[in-house]
Image: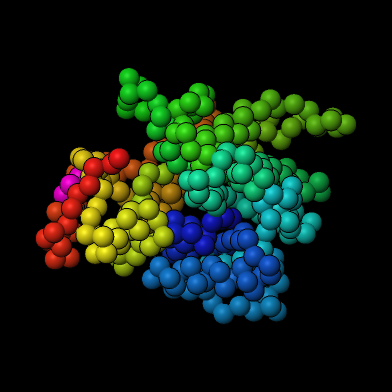
Amino acid sequence: LLTGATGALGAHILHCLRSSPTVSYITCLVRAASPFAAHERVSKSLIARGKPGLAPYSDSKPILTQKNTASSSTPEVNCIPTTLSHPYLGLDPSTYIHLANTTTLIIHAAWAVNFTARLRSFEKDHIAGLSHLLNLAHAASPDNNNNNKPAKRFLFLSSTASITNTPTANYPIAEHISTDPTHASPLGYSRSKWVAENICADFYNRPRTTTPGSSESDPRSDESKKVDIAILRIGQLTSDTICGIWNTSEAYPLMLSTAPILHALPDLGTLPLDWLPVDIAAKAVLEIAESMKKRRDEGVKEEERAFPVFHILNPSTTPTWGDLVAVVRKSASLSDLEVLAPR
C-alpha cells in the first residue's frame, strides 16, 4: 500500500514496486473524487517522470480484485480515492477490512511540501492521517483469525528537516528518534515531520494491554504479529539518473530558472550539493523494506530489529554551490552572471 504516488518520490517508488518480483499487488491511496480520477492522477504522474503509465482504467474491475502474478510479471495497481483525515481513510468497510487483512507493506510518502504553513495546518490531513494509517497497519477483521493476519511493515518517509536544528556538538546526527522538538528546524513542515516521527515511536511502544471488554490479549503481544515500523529521513532530492526530470516548481529549479532572466544567483558560499537523485532514493526505500522482511523471516529478535531510523542522503559533499554557479555561467553563456550576497 502506497500513499503519495502522485509526487516525485512516490512515483519512482511505485515504478520500483511494479518492477519488483516480490510484489504481487499494489494499492495506491490517492486524494481524488473517483476511482477513475485517482487512476488518472497516478498514471499521469508516472508518465510525467518518464515511466510507463498504468493500464487503461476499467470500471468493470472489482476494487478488491487481486491479480495472480503467475500469469504476469507486472503486479496489478489499484488506485483508490481516499481521505486520510477520516478515521477509516474514507474507505467503505469492506475495502478497509480487505486492506487490513491482506496488506503486508505500507509506504507512507504523502505529505504537503509547504514551507510557509504552520504546524497546526498539518494536523488534520497529515498528522491525523498518519495515525489512521498506523491503525490500518494494526487492524484486522473481527472474524479474521490472528494466525492468518499477515505481518506488516510500515515505512514512514520523513525528512532530515526534522533534526537539522540539532546542536552541532551532536554531529554527526545519530539515526534515532529525537525527543527534543527544538531539533527540528523552525518551519511548520519540519516540525510536522518531528511530530510524525514521535507518533510512530509512540505507536510502536504503546503498552500491549488486553482489549477492553475482551479476554483476549492485544495481538501485539504476539511478536510475530507486531507491526515493524521504520523512519526514513529523506534529504534533498534532485532529478533522476535516467531522464533528468526535476519538478520545476521546487526551490532549486525555480532559483536556477531565474538566472537567464535576472543574470544573477544568490551567494550560498560553499554549500555542499549533497543532492540525491530521486530514483536512487526510491531504490533505497525498497531495499530497506526488503531488508526488514528478510530480518523478520530469518528470525531476528524484535529487540534487535526494533524501530530503525535511516538517513537517506548522498554521502558526497562535493561539488559545492560555487561550482554549480560556475557551470551555469559557462553553459548558459552568462558571463555577466552576478553572485549576490543575502541581505
Residue 171 belongs to the span the image colors magenta: no
Residue drawn at (45%, 41%), measured in percent from left and top? Answer: 159
Q: Position of residue 169 (x, y in %)?
A: 32, 19
From where the camera sits, is residue 226 visible?
A: yes
Image spot of residue 102 (x, y percent): 66, 54
Percent x, y of residue 271:
24, 41
Does residue 212 sit above or below 114 in this rendering? above
Residue under the point 30% across and 62% down: 257
The percent coordinates of residue 124 (x first, y second) are 67, 45
Q: Is residue 291 left or right of residue 137?
A: left
Colour scheme: rainbow
Q: Quadrant of residue 334?
A: bottom left
Residue at the outermost top position: 169
From the viewer's side, name the closer residue of 272 and 109: 272
Does 46 sit above or below residue 211?
Answer: below
| Front-most of residues 65 and 174 | 174
Is residue 231 visible in the rendered image? The answer is no
Magenta highlight range: 319-323
Pick the quarter of the image with the C terminus: top left
Left-right relation of 81 to 153:
right
Dominant SS in magenta: helix
- Give the residue displayed 73% in from the left and 56% down from the top: 90
Task: Report the front residue among 327 and 19.
Answer: 327
Give the image quarter of residue 280.
Answer: bottom left
- Up the image or down, 105 lies above or below 333; here it is above
